[in-house]
Image (cartoon, grey):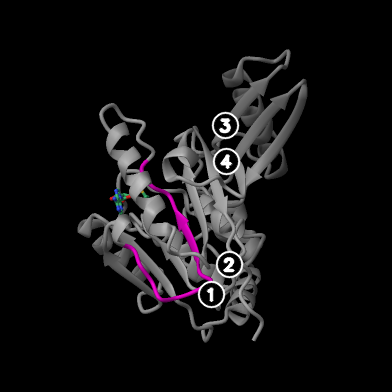
Amino acid sequence: MEGEHYLYQLPVLPVQGKSVKSKLFSVSDCQAIVKKAIVERLRKHYKKTSWFEENGPLFKIEIALHKDIATLTIDTSGVGLHKRGYRVNQGEAPLKETLAAALIQLTNWHPDRPFFDPFCGSGTIPIEAALIGQNIAPGFNRDFASESWPWIGKKVWEDARNEAEDLAKYDQPLQITGTDIDHRMIEVSKENAIEAGLGDLITFKQMQVSDITTKNEYGVLVGNPPYGERLGERKEVEKMYRDMGKAFAELDTWSVYILTSYEQFEEVYGKKATKKRKLFNGFIRTDLYQYWGPRPPRV
Ligand SMILES: C[S@@+](CC[C@H](N)C(=O)[O-])C[C@H]1O[C@@H](n2cnc3c(N)ncnc32)[C@H](O)[C@@H]1O
């Protein structure tokens, strides 16, 4: 039985901690106390007298103290959920996959409308759009820490994966394009899309944003351009935003969403956003400038 295996392979129990506005402020002491308490209980339960060797599955534990209330959690995922497992390579400032997915979900994109990312970098936004467009579960090609927990059992995981597979719409046609000024990033995007199993679904090509034109209508464009925060970059980025404003003025049926920390974006781009939304890209405070286009006609 799988459960019995657990008796002989003792869990690995790293304990992390944090303390905010609490009397117990020494995080390392709290971690040590929690670890000792867990180990004591396990020793009693399994009638072991000696300290045991941790050689089994990983149970990452966290003790979080907030205003004197302690919350004890076990991490079922392992590496962060934003790591979907397809990004084999990346550029200088890649977006977290989860933020890329959130940006798409903040738009009114529907899989039968064209989708465009003019600053695709390592391809995160177009790849996430393809996953959303075909309803493919995020994380379908990664492992989770709790897969090695014997008491969950392999069947539960198999069933969950089969359920996700049944819900995927692999026949949904998509028109997704990613472009970038840097041809090396186009190669990286292609590699990552292939790793995600979406190689044929997304078109990647080298192009600078000011050259973008399209005959497609009612599309959705989501871009994460450079923010011009580094010394010497600002002037160049301002010029690029200005040129982008002129190029996108032609896309009058499109909805445009630009994420940047550059505070005068609307002035330089030349148009006031329909709506602005504050978002954190890691520790950088940014705004998602939203320019809503007209609704596509009903067919
Ligand atoms: C912040 S990164 C985008 C990162 C991307 N979202 C990802 O997850 O990997 C900005 C990208 O804009 C590209 N870029 C800079 N200037 C550009 C321009 N004028 N036209 C098109 N792309 C440009 C850079 O090569 C870089 O890959």
Answer above or below: position of 150 versus 297. above
Q: Which residues are magenta?
A: 212-226
Residue closest to the eye, 97 or 70: 97
Query: Which SS class for mark 4?
Result: strand
Q: Quadrant of the C terminus?
A: bottom right
For the residue marked with disc 2, what is the amino acid? Trp
For the residue marked with disc 4, what is the amino acid? Leu
Residue closest to the eye, 275 or 89: 275
Q: What residue sits right under mark 4 in the picture?
A: 279
- Alpha-carbon span between mark 1 and mark 2: 7 Å
Checking the image for residue 109, the label placed there is 2
For the residue marked with disc 3, what is the amino acid? Gln
Q: What residue sits right under mark 3 in the picture?
A: 16
First reached walking from the N terminus: tag 2 or tag 4: 2
Q: Is residue 232 something one can see in this rendering?
A: yes
Say which quarter of the image contains residue 144: bottom right
Outermost residue to the left: 183
Q: Please name the predominant secondary structure of the magenta segment in the image.
A: loop
- Alpha-carbon span between mark 4 and mark 1: 25 Å
- For label 3, being within 8 Å of ligand 1 is answered no
First reached walking from the N terminus: tag 2 or tag 3: 3
Q: Residue at x 61, y 74 (%)?
A: 296
Q: Nearer the viewer, mark 2 or mark 3?
A: 2
